[in-house]
Image: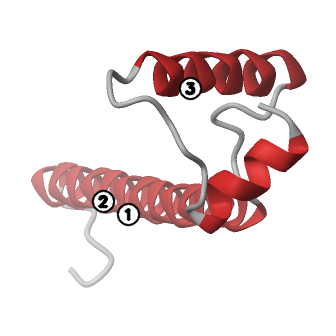
């Protein structure tokens, strides 16, 4: 589609056949042009920013989950240690 035809399309003044063949040819050429230049399905700056923010949120929640898991593991070890010391009669408070 040439510049003049593209402008007519944007303005809504482009006259096309009623059978749709011409429209499909324009659509196919548009797709081929956009695909060859790398513009087809290219992320906008806003979409890139959203994806980056989602990744940061995901990473932060994983770090928090990992910290909670480590804390729980430490608490389990302490409880086991206290239980073992209690069984041996070596409690700090005893």
**Which is in the foreground here, disc 3 or disc 2?**
3
Quickly name the residue at label 2.
72
Residue 72: image location, x then y, percent: 30, 59
Residues marked 2 and 1 touching at CB (< 8 Å): yes
**Which is in the foreground here, disc 1 or disc 3?**
3
Q: Mark 1: give few (<14), some (14-19) or many (20+) Cα within 10 Å.
A: few
Residues marked 3 and 2 touching at CB (< 8 Å): no
Disc sitting over residue 88 in the figure: none
- Mark 3 vs 2, N-terminal side: 3
**Which is in the foreground here, disc 2 or disc 1?**
1
Disc sitting over residue 27 in the figure: 3
Quickly name the residue at label 1.
68
Residue 86: image location, x then y, percent: 15, 60
Above-or-below relation of 76 to 21: below
Name the quadrant containing residue 54: bottom right
As helix, strand or loop, the secondary structure at mark 2 comes to helix
Rendered-image quadrant of the C terminus = bottom left
- Residue that appears at 37% across and 24% down: 20
- Residue that appears at 32% across and 60% down: 78
Judged left or right of residue 34, residue 27 is left
Real-space Cα separation, disc 1 to disc 3, in angstroms: 53 Å
Residue 76: image location, x then y, percent: 25, 54
Judged left or right of residue 81, residue 87 is left
Question: Toward the viewer: 91 or 31?
Answer: 31
Rendered-image quadrant of the N terminus = top right
Q: How is the image coloured?
A: secondary structure
- Residue that appears at 27% across and 62% down: 90
């Amino acid at each position: 589609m040439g510049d003049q035809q593209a402008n007519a399309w944007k303005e809504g003044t482009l006259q096309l056949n009623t059978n749709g063949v011409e429209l499909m040819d324009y659509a196919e050429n548009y797709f081929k042009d956009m695909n060859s230049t790398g513009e087809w399905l290219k992320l906008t700056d806003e979409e890139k920013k959203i994806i980056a923010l989602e990744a940061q949120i995901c990473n932060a929640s994983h770090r928090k989950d990992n910290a909670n898991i480590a804390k729980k593991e430490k608490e389990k070890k302490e409880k086991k240690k206290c239980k073992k010391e209690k069984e041996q009669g070596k409690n700090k408070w005893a």
